[in-house]
Image (cartoon, grey):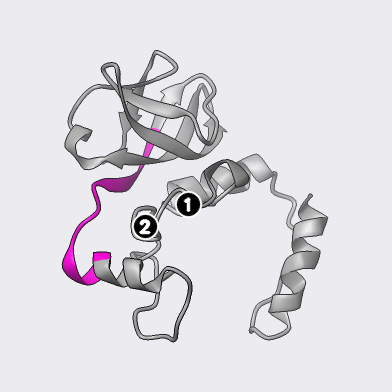
Amino acid sequence: MIEVLQTSLQKYAVFSKVDLSITDKSIEQSTLELIQQRVAIILPETQEKFTPQAIGFEKIGGVSFDKGCYTGQEIIARVHYRGKTKTVFRVGSAKGACRPGDPIYAGAKPCGEVINSAAAGATTACSVIIQTDVLTQSLTIHSRPFVLQP
């Protein structure tokens, strides 16, 4: 899969000033590092579910408000200039396995979703999208406690 991705991305590298190479890190380790750096990776399970602001792309320079036109620009600009989202991007952990697309609960109410996950010792680190009104409540995933990082 890595080779297919590298071949696909290589055509863009020709026009950019980047060098693409395969490292000896595992996908799991690379995913864990991105989660710890608070960078979301959109996978097929989470594709077209979130706005760039909701997953923190605005904070890492992944959205430009000065550049030409792109699909969804009006909605993204409207949220940026006029309002706030009802969900936020956060990082957390749970004991046991979690997968992208898994729901997070506050009591019996679904309130978020796993974007990415990677094993981190006895726990699983996850990047999640979560409703702002439940940030201080007890959260669960697969009936296990889910703890958000500050």
Alpha-carbon neighbours of circle 2 within 10 Å: few (<14), some, or many (≥20)?
some
Residue 64: percent from left, percent from top:
39, 77
On the question of residue 21 being in view, the answer is: no
Which residues, given as a range, are shown in magenta? 79-92
**Position of 95 relative to 46 (above/below):** above
Residue 49 has which mark? none
Q: Quadrant of residue 78?
A: bottom left
- Residue 4 in the figure: left or right of residue 118: right
Report the Cα–Cα distance between label 1 and label 2: 8 Å
Q: Which residue is mark 2?
A: 56
| Residue 139 left/right relative to 98 | left
Q: Mark 1 highlights which residue?
A: 40
- Of callouts 1 and 2, the N-terminal one: 1
Residue 105 seen in the figure: yes
Q: Residue at x 26, y 64 (%)?
A: 79
Vertical comparison of 92 with 19: above or below = above
**Residue 89 percent coordinates (x, y):** 34, 48
Residue at 45% across / 36% down in the picture? 114
**Residue shown at the point (21%, 32%) measured from the top left:** 134
Assign a secondary structure to mark 1.
loop
131, above or below 93, in the image? below
- Do residues under tags 1 and 2 come within 8 Å of each other at their CB atoms? yes
Residue type at the position of mark 2: Gly
Residue 3: quadrant of the picture:
bottom right
